[in-house]
Structure formats: structure tokens, C-alpha cells
Amino acid sequence: MARPKKCPKCPPGAPIWMATFTDLMSLLLTFFVLLLTMANFDPVKYALTVDSFQSAFGIMPSFPTIPIHPIVEIPKKTGDEQRKKQSLKDAEKVKEIVQTKNLEESVKVDVTEKGIAIMLRDPVGFASGSSDLKEQGKDILKDIGDIIKNNADLKIRVEGHTDNVPISSQRYRNNWELSSARSLSVVQLMHSQTGIKPENMSAVGYGEHRPIATNATPEDRSKNRRIQIFVDYIN
């Protein structure tokens, strides 16, 4: 009786770790496919990137490209980015001058989404009941004007604020009129120093109606007596 033939020995299979590795690769592929389907491509940036590579490698376009309809928006975005960077530089320069003059408690400089916000209060602001800037206030405004005057098409808005102590004089009937006169005097001074177009400047008076402190103490009232200057680099 013939002996049954033995089956040939099976070759060794893949290592055990390959099963886990394969599962991991499948999951990663699924994850990136999901990301790709959810991605939102900017056709303008895509087209500019393609053109940049073509120019760099000397490749002439021989296939349909994405039409660029909103191309007119690109210079505006680039200009806004440059103006934003310039506003940051100017804000740093203003802060340096304020520190040099030891006016950190009287002059506050902040960066906004559109440019710079500058707040002036005692003792560099105005004398009680007056709309005439003190000499220290004129000096710091001149320094600010020297920094920003080289930027084209700036928009400047000046807001005047007072405390809640009533005022009644031959010149001003109430705090509203006083705050408006103060903001207007700042606008006129900055215009004469910077040469910024009058149509790009505005003056607003809020009186005591937008306090930043309680008016309960002399210190709080001094905080509310302020001028706020908003210099917008981005329109």
C-alpha cells in the first residue's frame, strides 16, 4: 500500500506586526481622504501657486487652469497686510516715545484690528473746563503726528470724554459740548501737524455718557476725563 504524500511545508507568513501596521495605514488613508473632502481650497491662491511653480520651472501651461474672477481683491489683501505691519511698527515707536517722556500713566497705546488706539488723560490733556490742550499734550501729539504722517489714506477719529461733574459756563452749556470742543481741537491740531486730509478726520464728543470708571472717586473721575484717538491704517 502506497504511503500518502506529505504536504509541502508552507512558507512562513508575514510577521504579526504587519497586520497592525496595515490596519494603521488604512486608517490614516481614510483620515486623510476625509480631510481632503472637507478642505476648502481658495482658487485664487491655488492659481497663483500654480503660476509661481510654472514660472520657476519654465513650464508653459498646457492644461485648463482655474479661472481667477476675484483677482482684483488680491492687491487689497496684500496692501492691508502691509498696512497692518506698518501700524504695529508705528505703535512700537509711539510706545517708545511715551516711555522716554515717562508718560506711561497718562498716555496709553494699544493695537486694534485696523490700526492704533491712543488714549490721553490727565495731566497731558486739558485744564478744567477748557478745550485748550496743555503744552505736554501738544508735544506728544506732535511726536505721534511725526510718526504717522508718512502713511497715506489714514482715517483718524477723535473721541472726547468727561467725568460726570456738571459744567455750565458762558462757553459750554454742558459736558457734551465741552467734550466735543476738546476732540475738535485735537483734530485741528493733528491736521495741522500731519497734513492728513480733513475728509479723513472726525471729532466726536460723548460727554460723561461713556465712562470707563465709576466716577465715585477723584481717581476714577480723572480716568473718565480722556481723549481717545483711533488711527485706522486699514479702511
Image (cartoon, helix red, strand yellow):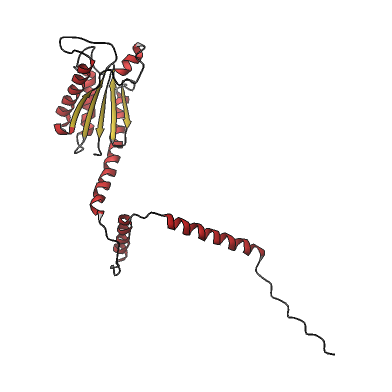
- Residue in the picture at 14% in, 27% down: 192
Q: Tell me where residue 178 appears, x and y as whole percent.
A: 21, 16
Closer to the camera in the image, 177 or 127: 177
Q: How many labels does the image show?
A: 0
Q: Tell me where residue 132 appears, x and y as whole percent.
A: 18, 17
In the rendered image, the residue lying farthest to the top is: 169
Q: Tell me where residue 209 appears, x and y as whole percent.
A: 29, 19
- Residue in the picture at 18% in, 19% down: 181
Give above or below for 100 relative to 11. above
Closer to the camera in the image, 162 or 84: 162
Question: Residue 87 is drawn in which quadrant?
Answer: top left
The quadrant of the picture occupied by the N terminus is bottom right
The quadrant of the picture occupied by the C terminus is top left
Q: Tell me where residue 229 appears, x and y as whole percent.
A: 25, 27
Q: In this view, does 136 lie to the left or right of 49?
A: left
Question: Residue 197 is drawn in which quadrant?
Answer: top left
- Residue in the picture at 34% in, 54% down: 42
Question: Residue 212 is drawn in which quadrant?
Answer: top left
Give above or below for 61 relative to 160. below
In the rendered image, the residue lying farthest to the right is: 1
Closer to the camera in the image, 210 or 98: 210
Residue 134 visible in the picture: no
Closer to the camera in the image, 189 or 13: 13
Residue 99 visible in the picture: yes
